[in-house]
Image: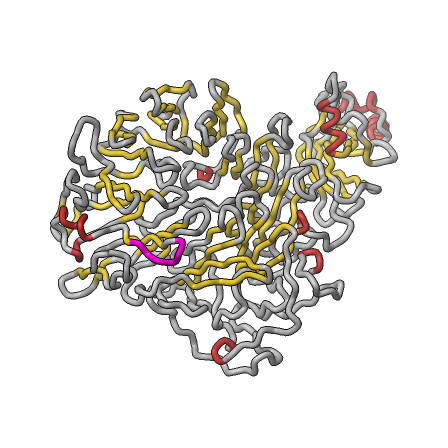
Amino acid sequence: MMRKGIALVGCIAGILSTCAGTASAAPPAILSVGVAEEKVTDTGVELLGTINPEGLPTTYRFEYLTAAAYEANLEADPPRDPFSGALLAPEGGPGPVGFDTSPHEVRAPVHSLAPSTSYRFRLRATNSVPESVVSVERPFATKESTPNPELLDHRGWEMVSPIDKAGGAIQPPGTIFGGGVFQAADGGESFTYSSADSFGGAPGAPPGSQYIATRTGGGWTSANITAPLLSGSYGSELDGVPYQLFSDDLRYGLLSNGERCRGVEGGECPVANPPLPGSGAPAGYRDYYRRTAAGGFESLLKAAELEHTSLRPEQFELRLVAATPDLAHVVLSTCAALTADATEVTAPGGCAPGEQNLYEWSGGTLSLINRLPGETTGTPGATIAAPGGAMSNDGSRVYFTAEGDVYLSEAGTTKTVLGTPGGKFEAAAADGSIAYLIDSGELDRYSATTGTLTPLASGGGVEGVLGVSADGSKAYYARSGAIFLRDGSTVTEIASSAVPGDWPAATGTARITEDGRHLLFLSTAELTGYPNEGETEVFLYGPPSGGSAPTLACISCNPSGERPRGSATIPAARRNGTGTDAIDSYKPRALSADGRRVFFETADSISVQDTSGATDVYEWEAAGEGTCARGGGCVQLISGGRDPQPSYFLDADRDGGEAFFLTAGSLFPLDPGSYDVYDAREYGGFAVPESRIPCFADACQVIPEAPEDPTPGTLAGNSGNPGLTIAGGKGSQGRSGKRKHKKRRRHKSGRHSKHKGSKR
């Protein structure tokens, strides 16, 4: 007993030689390392970890240094240990852990840190085994020194949708009869959005009205561009809104005139909506209109083209499947023969669903696409190769599939691209000259110039292509769950894990810059050392500055190092409707053209301003971009961060100077409530009017709760109209139901000359 007592006292005293015989010689095990939640301030943090001593007396130290010093060590010539010159915690010396075989939590407060600064740290554990154990490296960052910093790039909030919406609101994407179209002009200054509510002097009121907002010197003005014809049947299901696509500058739009009637005597009837005046559209036929820059409409279908079909209006179907960014070229799908060289296959009641033809509309005429090599007439059963990217930007090349093979239509001729059953087109260069395909798990590259298909050594297991550069020289693809970059003949592994929703390139969440140097994607894995614990985070691969070597960064991970409280995401291509015919070829610009700005949504609170507990919209930008001077980049709120209802990222312009989002928060002092479209604009903000814009009649009503599953053609009624209130009076802009009343807020500084995010 006495000898055991002496050994125990020796262990407690840390006399390692005394304890060496009481346990097998094993190094300690570091089980976790992280940052204590609610302990991160502008000048301090508490680091924590879990260590198993493995039966030997063990001590611990945290090593930490700024991210800038860490990078400098790596870039030194010769390279140094990345933690060379690191500070240590606890400050008084190594802290004791214990000497048993159980996990022990260790903590160390750190003080006197610089505000708004990124750091790297690791945990070291030591016992009598000669080699100490070092944990994985983790990042953390101190918070801002003020609770209300300015938005990045001196952004100011500008209310895009009008204050007076006749008691209505702007609903989130995907909820406006299953769809909605939200798109920013490539160069900024204008934005189009949908709403289930009609306001602003609409000539028609179909399910889902469409608006174009334009920025002026004094604010944003919205024009209702809903077509006047759509007062009849539009669709029987959640078919989205009539507008389908817009050109990249918003000058042109594609509009559906609705579906054939159903549920009537005889089973079907022609499209109920009459042709738009001056459009040249045939009455009763399923059709699409192209809205011109002057506001007129042109029918894509002409009466002369119907001379080739035997189908009656009530049997006729037509589907939009692809278009060029300027909408100068459009691809339509139908079983009907619309040209003399097309082959029509019908079935009882009309079209044979699986025997489709493809037509390209350009300059007011249709031409058949699906003529196979050496044939003078079309072969039905063709489909567009992908919802996006299968048609070159100038419309000169179109990739399609027929009879299980992949073909290229170019200059009136057709070439076989891949003649293997089961082969799949994935993506192509902007001009269609290079295409990437998957054949039996292998990645292939096709050259339209030479007509050759080249197998690329990939080891099999290729699941999809995330994106390709504009010239086709670079391709990012997923193989066995990991992401690889093929640049010429060089293959580089980018990330060990991605989520299946990152691909295919046409509709997935991943984004790639035109030069192919940056890739934006999602993953649930700990790719950069941040303990995301299975939550989805947003990652960016690419050079952090002009000539730097590419790196992988988690841009949605909490910079403080605190564990996530929710997932982050970026939108994939948004479907306008829930049916199989819904178009989903437009992907919001979550990544700027140069790859140095990213917009994302997250349920995590990664800014001290974010107290909503709901999903908010954030911006990340690289160091040296705009106002960001922090190594590793800066992340800041775009939405308000205080409203308990979720906010949604809608779109951005090409360079990311304008970021459009949907929020229920009143970010403009005169905003009375409900969901509205806002623009977080670089150096933005307008003078605030002295008084609230008056409301009249029904516009003064309380905003009712939106119906959860509205029926197309009607806005489902609620329990009854609320009582009238006095215009401009107290409580006149209240809201009932689950939505909370939003009060008019005044800038904390007391100044009202500019509506800036920094004054909230």
Who is closer to the viewer here, 130 or 111? 111
635 on left or right of 95? left
Whether the magenta-drawn stretch holds residue 556 is answered as no
Residue 516 shows in the view: yes
Residue 403 lies in quadrant: top left
632 on left or right of 572? right
Residue 456 lies in quadrant: top left
Q: Determine the residue located farthest toward the top in the rendered image.
A: 78
| Above or below, comparing residue 621 to residue 685 in the picture | above
Range drawn in magenta: 293-298
At x 42%, y 36%, the residue is: 505
Residue 480 shows in the view: no
Main secondary structure type of the part rendered in magenta:
loop
Quadrant (top left/top right/bottom left/bottom right) for the C terminus: bottom right
Q: Where is residue 224 in the image (x, y as percent from the top left)?
A: 43, 63
Who is closer to the viewer here, 603 or 578? 578
Q: Where is residue 354 in the image (x, y as percent from the top left)?
A: 20, 42
Quadrant (top left/top right/bottom left/bottom right) for the N terminus: top right
Q: Where is residue 332 in the image (x, y as percent from the top left)?
A: 27, 45
